Image: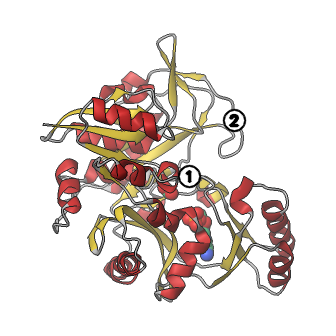
Amino acid sequence: MAKVLVIGSGGREHAIAWKFSQSRHVEEVFVAPGNPGMSDVATLVNIPQNNFEALKSFVKENHIDLTFVGPEIPLCDGIVDSFEADGLNIFGPSKAAAMLEGSKVFSKEMMKKYGIPTASYESFSDYKMAKEYLAKQEMPIVLKADGLAAGKGVIIASTMLEAQTALEDMMCNSLFDQAGSSVVIEEYLEGEEFSQLAFVNEELVVPMEIAQDHKRAYDNDEGLNTGGMGAYTPVNHLPKQAITDAIEQIMKPMAKAMVLEGTPFKGVLYGGCMWTKKGVKTIEFNVRFGDPETEVLLVSLEDDLYEVIEKVTRKEAVELHWSKDPVLGVVLANKGYPGSYTKGAVIENLSDVDATVFHMGTGKLDGKTTATGGRVLFVAKQAPTLKEAQTEVYAEIKKIKCDNLFYRTDIGAKGMK
Ligand code: AMP
Ligand code: GLY
C-alpha cells in the first residue's frame, strides 16, 4: 500500500486528497500544508509549499511513494526538478515545462510557433511601445500580465481609456507586482469557454471530461475575474466537434511541441479553450489541475486516481471513465474577493450540509470553522440532471450560516439553456 503527499492548501487539493484516500492502493494521504477542513481525508503536514528541502526530508523520512503537486507556484519554482534530482517520485511538470503557465509570453510564442489556434497578439516589455501599439487597436481588447497573478492578471477593456489605464497600472504601477512588467495585448474572442484537462506524459495525452468554470465574481458574468466561482461537468450543450478539436488541435499538439522543444511535459495540462465561430481557440494553458474544475471532475471520475497516475507515469494509455450524472458545485467566497476581504468569520451549520464539501480556505478557531481564504468553501452535488444538481446545491448552501460569505446564484445556467 502506498503513501501519498499532496502539496497545496485549497479546494483543489482537498478534492485530490479525497480522491486518493479512496484508492485501493493508498494507505495514507498527507497534505502540506493543507487546511484544517481536509483533516477528514488526510493528515496535515505543517510545511509550506515553497520549502522544498523540508518537503523532501518529510518524503524521505515517511517513505512517501508519490508526491502530487496542486498549485502552479511550486511547479513554476521547480519543485519537480528538485524532487527528481533526489530520485523522488513526483507528478507534475518541470520548471521549464511549467513556463506554459508561468509566462503568458512564452505560452503565446509556443502556440504561434506550432500553429495552435489562439487569439492574435503582440507582447511587450517596453511601456512606450505597448502604448503605441494599443492606440492603434480596436476595442474591446484583452491585456494580460505575463507572470502569475492567481487568475486575476487579465483585463478585458471595452474602451480605449480603460485599456490605457489598465496598461499603465500593469506596466508602470505594478498592479500585479512583477507579473505585469511584460504584457500580452491580444484580440478579444467571443464564444463559449470550457476547460479541457488531460493527464500528459511526453506525447501521451489522456483527456479528461470537459468542465466549465465561471471566472467572473458575480451573476451573469459581471464583476472582476476570479480564480473561479463554480463549475460543472460534463458540458453537454457544446458540440462534440469542440471537444475533438480541443484534443486534436490544442492538447496533443502542445504536448508534442514541448517534446520537440526538449522540455517534455509530465503532469496535468489544462487547456482553457473557447468555442468560437471560427472554431476552437486557446485562451490559456495551465500546468496543473484547475480550481474549481477539479472539485467536480474528481467527483465524476470513476477510476482510481493513483492507478491513473501510475499508468501515465509509465506512459501507458489509459481510458478514463466518468459518471453519467452531472456534477455541479458552487464557491462560497469572502465578501470583497477577488479584492481585499475580512478574514476569520465563523461558519456555522456545516455539518448539516448533505453535499460534497471541499474546503478552499478555512481555518479553525476554538473548535469552530472560520473563513480564512478569498475562496472559502466548495459545495458540490451529483444528480441525474444538471438542473437537479443545481437546485440541490443551492438548497444545501442555504443551510450554511456565515454573514461574510457570498456566492453566485447562476452556476450551471449556461448548461441548461
Ligand atoms: P486567462 O487567465 O488567460 O484564462 O484569462 C481569464 C479570463 O479572461 C478567461 O477565462 C476569459 O474569460 C477571459 N479572456 C482571456 N483572454 C480572452 C480573450 N482573448 N478574449 C476574450 N476573453 C478572454
Ligand atoms: N479555474 C481556473 C484555474 O484553475 O485557473
The amino acid marked with disc number 1 is Gly
Where does the image place residue 173, in percent across and percent down from the top left? 84, 57
Q: Quadrant of ligand 1?
A: bottom right
Q: Which is nearer the eye, 69 or 52?
A: 52
Q: Seen in the image, is 353 located left or right of residue 64?
A: right
Where does the image place residue 338, in percent across and percent down from the top left? 66, 46
Report which residue position mark 1 lands on.
227
Where does the image place residue 409, in percent across and percent down from the top left? 53, 48
Sequence-wise, which precedes: disc 2 or disc 1?
1
Give the alpha-carbon distance from disc 2 to disc 1, as whole Å. Answer: 15 Å
Q: Quadrant of the C terminus?
A: bottom left
Where does the image place residue 55, in percent across and percent down from the top left? 40, 36
Q: Seen in the image, is 49 located left or right of residue 267?
A: right
Q: Is mark 2 within 8 Å of ligand 2?
A: no
Identify the residue shown where x is 49% and y is 34%.
Answer: 48
Q: Is mark 1 within 8 Å of ligand 2?
A: yes
Q: Which is nearer the eye, 395 or 317?
A: 317
Report which residue position mark 2 lands on.
341
Identify the residue shown where x is 22% and y is 62%.
Answer: 312
Q: In the rendering, which numbered label is found on residue 286?
A: none
Any part of residue 201 in sight: yes
Q: Seen in the image, is 257 located left or right of residue 187?
A: left
Q: Residue furthest front?
A: 86
Q: Determine the image quadrant of residue 53.
A: top left
Question: Looking at the image, is 27 positioned above or below residue 74?
Answer: above
Q: Which is nearer the eye, 85 or 293?
A: 85
Identify the residue shown where x is 51% and y is 24%.
Answer: 363
Q: Quadrant of the N terminus?
A: top left
Q: Determine the image quadrant of residue 165.
A: bottom right
In contact (CB < 8 Å): disc 2 and disc 1: no
For label 1, the SS is: loop
